[in-house]
Amino acid sequence: MDIMNLGICMTTHSLPTAPHHIGKYQETDCKRVLDLFSQGMVEHVPATFCHGLKLPQTLLVLLGVPITLLLVSGSWLLALGSNVTLLVILWLLARELWRQYVIMYLQADLVDITKSYLSAHGSCFWVAESGGQVAGIVGALPVENAPPGRKQLQLFHLSVALEHRGEGLGKALVMTVLQFARAQGYSEVVLDTSIVQQAALTLYLRMGFQKTGEYFPDKISRLLDVPTIRLMYSFPSAQEAGR
């Protein structure tokens, strides 16, 4: 399908291999959309914990603290107990990272999805349904402070329900955003993801997104060494114009 021939805000998109329907967000979708968003973020806690566990500084603390306590107190129980405590603290930090992320967006654009995404030209929010259930979501908003001469659209909140992964729905949702962006005259689509969201990161890179930078949005992400990665997709016409 030619990406240039799509309408301004797609209301349907069906996959030939699965009974998915991608349509514009409606108020009746609100609770299910917020639940999917929240659950999807919480799923990253174990991966974040494992990532933090592999850090050299974490391994050093897990080795150094018990040895120090054993040498000082002579108690193996105290030494082993310290490691359990450190692991619990690491888990709580990983959970807090994603808890704060969820709270931040639930108090921002997701407070009123219709107002945030559907009340102005050049933005949209899509919901994928399967069997009457919300199977996936994605949103897109214009970048307010885009570089001079570039019109950018930012992709937000791509999430696919666990039971519908592996069906190509994530790719279909990203394509929906790219098709919308091209039809609206955007030159680039940008997004933020994290190093622990490996499935999403792999999908974006395979679809032609390029890494443009990374940063730590808060102290916990820096402590756990979980940078946010900025990616960008440039349409061919924009790339040729920049040469």
Image (tube, rainbow, N blue to C red):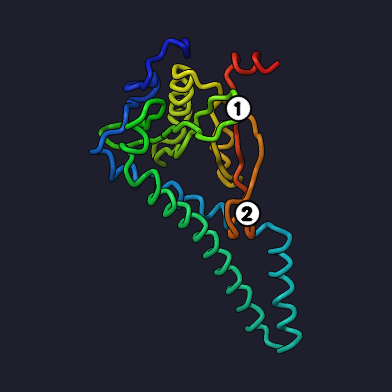
Question: Which quadrant of the view contains residue 74?
Answer: bottom right
Mark 2 Cα within 10 Å, few/some/many (few <14, many 20+)?
Answer: some
| Residue extending furthest toward the front | 148
Q: Position of residue 134 (x, y in %)?
A: 32, 37
Q: Nearer the viewer, residue 29 or 146?
A: 146
Q: Position of residue 180 (x, y in %)?
A: 43, 21
Q: Nearer the viewer, mark 1 or mark 2?
A: 1
Q: Amino acid at mark 2?
A: His
Q: Nearer the viewer, residue 82 or 221?
A: 221
Is residue 109 shown left or right of residue 171? left
Q: Amino acid at mark 1?
A: Pro
Query: In the rendered image, which quarter contains the C terminus?
Result: top right
| Residue extending furthest toward the bottom | 73
SS class, disc 1: loop
Residue at 51%, 22% in the rendered image: 186
Residue at 63%, 48% in the rendered image: 227
Q: Position of residue 114 (x, y in %)?
A: 31, 36
Circle on res. 51 = 2
Mark 1 or mark 2: which comes first in sequence? 2
Q: Nearer the viewer, residue 15 or 188?
A: 188
Q: What is the count of numbered marks?
A: 2
Mark 1 Cα within 10 Å, few/some/many (few <14, many 20+)?
Answer: few
Residue 93's place in the image compared with 172, above or below, is below
Residue at 70%, 76% in the rendered image: 65
SS class, disc 2: helix
Query: In the rendered image, which quarter contains the N terminus?
Result: top left
Q: Position of residue 234 (x, y in %)?
A: 59, 23
Circle on res. 148 = 1
Circle on res. 84 = none
Q: Are marks 1 and 2 in contact (CB under 8 Å)?
A: no
- C-alpha gap between disc 1 and disc 2: 37 Å
Question: Which quadrant of the view contains residue 192?
Answer: top right
